[in-house]
Image (cartoon, rainbow, N blue to C red):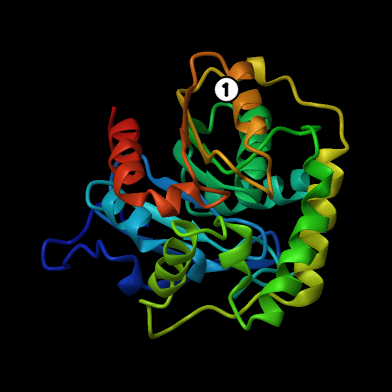
């Protein structure tokens, strides 16, 4: 694996144009995309429930990829990655670790959202030496209050979306008010900017297995997060119905020296609604 770009190879900094790649490890073929200048510590993106490579907001990834090597991947059994989705967050974490090591990295920065943030926490607890910096958005700790209700909210919003022929994320990630609705539509449209080489949708069974894993995570004994010494940035909207906003505050209290941003009048997708404010903060935090 080359750690530097060859001079004649232009650096791709638009996620919509990031080449699709695969790596095989532990009997699984992992699908991933990479962009930004190679070299240095990469920023690995850990995606949310039901999401594939096509679910990252280019307005968040692109600014980070201007100055950093960015890698987004499909966990086992999701999108174009082979195998079965694990039914626990810890097993997803083992897969993520396998994938990162297969690419040859022994130090990464992590950017995570929602379920990805649960996987990221478990990764830092299990492999503290691997992670230099941690961005946790729209997520909560193991054993967090009401975390096990995620499935109920999710199914209800999928039903509401189906009845109105909308994308479920418009209900799950955004408030249904005058600010939230246009932000939701803008976000969903941004996800369509990549027109070629798109990822396979998640299968229903894989999605249900992920929900089971989140429920298990919500009902498990909490991890000791005081062991996390990595610089950590935590962000969410103030009205997260999926992973209650108080859980971001809980994480902030438990991870010493962490920074917390709560965006007003926004939900689970607060960082996407406020991408113009949030992206520069994330870039600055990761560059520090």
Total numbered labels: 1
Instruction: Tell me the quarter of the picture where residue 141 sits.
Output: top right
Q: Is residue 266 above or below residue 231?
A: below
Q: Is residue 165 above or below residue 177?
A: below
Residue at (33, 45) in percent of width and height: 279
- How crowded pointer 1 is (Cα within 10 Å; few <14, some 14-19, many 20+) is rated as many
Q: Residue furthest left?
A: 8
Percent from the top left, x then y, of residue 112?
A: 53, 45
The quadrant the C terminus occupies is top left
Of residues 103 and 263, the one nearer the viewer is 263
Instruction: Tell me the quarter of the picture where residue 74 sits.
Output: bottom right
Q: Is residue 58 left or right of residue 167?
A: left
Residue at (65, 15) in percent of width and height: 226
Q: Is residue 263 above or below residue 87?
A: above
Of residues 108 and 236, the one nearer the viewer is 236
Query: Is residue 122 in sight in this rendering?
Result: yes
Q: Pointer 1: what residue?
A: 252
Of residues 28 and 142, the one nearer the viewer is 142
Percent from the top left, x then y, of residue 265?
A: 49, 44
Q: Is residue 205 left or right of residue 57?
A: right
Q: Residue furthest front?
A: 178
The quadrant the N terminus occupies is bottom left
Q: Is residue 75 above or below residue 268?
A: below
Residue at (77, 56) in percent of width and height: 153
Percent from the top left, x then y, of residue 193?
A: 36, 76
Q: Is residue 244 left or right of residue 190?
A: right
Say what secondary structure mark 1 lies in: helix
Percent from the top left, x then y, of residue 184?
A: 48, 64
Residue at (47, 81) in percent of width and height: 198
Query: Is residue 87 in sight in this rendering?
Result: no
């Amino acid at each position: 694996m080359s750690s530097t770009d060859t001079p004649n190879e232009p650096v791709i900094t638009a996620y919509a144009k990031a080449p699709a790649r695969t790596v095989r490890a532990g009997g699984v073929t992992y699908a991933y995309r990479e962009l930004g200048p190679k070299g240095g510590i990469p920023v690995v993106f850990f995606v949310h429930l039901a999401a594939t490579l096509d679910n990252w907001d280019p307005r968040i990834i692109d600014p980070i990829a201007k100055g950093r090597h960015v890698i987004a991947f499909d966990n086992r059994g999701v999108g174009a990655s082979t195998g079965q989705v694990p039914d626990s967050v810890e097993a997803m974490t083992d897969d993520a670790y396998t994938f990162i090591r297969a690419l040859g990295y022994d130090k990464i920065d992590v950017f995570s959202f929602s379920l990805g943030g649960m996987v990221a926490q478990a990764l830092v607890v299990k492999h503290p030496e691997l992670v230099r910096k941690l961005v946790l958005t729209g997520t909560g700790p193991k054993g967090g209050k009401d975390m096990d209700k995620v499935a109920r909210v999710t199914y209800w919003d999928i039903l509401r979306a189906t009845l109105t022929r909308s994308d479920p994320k418009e209900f799950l990630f955004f408030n249904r008010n005058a600010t939230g609705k246009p932000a939701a539509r803008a976000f969903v449209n941004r996800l369509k900017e990549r027109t070629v080489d798109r990822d396979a949708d998640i299968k229903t069974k894989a999605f249900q297995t992920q929900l089971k894993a989140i429920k298990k995570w919500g009902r498990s004994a909490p991890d000791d997060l005081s062991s996390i010494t990595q610089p950590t940035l935590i962000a969410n909207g103030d009205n997260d119905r999926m992973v209650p906003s108080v859980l971001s505050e809980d994480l902030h209290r438990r991870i010493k020296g962490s920074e917390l941003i709560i965006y007003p009048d926004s939900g689970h997708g607060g960082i996407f609604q406020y991408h113009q404010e949030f992206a520069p903060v994330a870039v600055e935090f990761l560059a520090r």
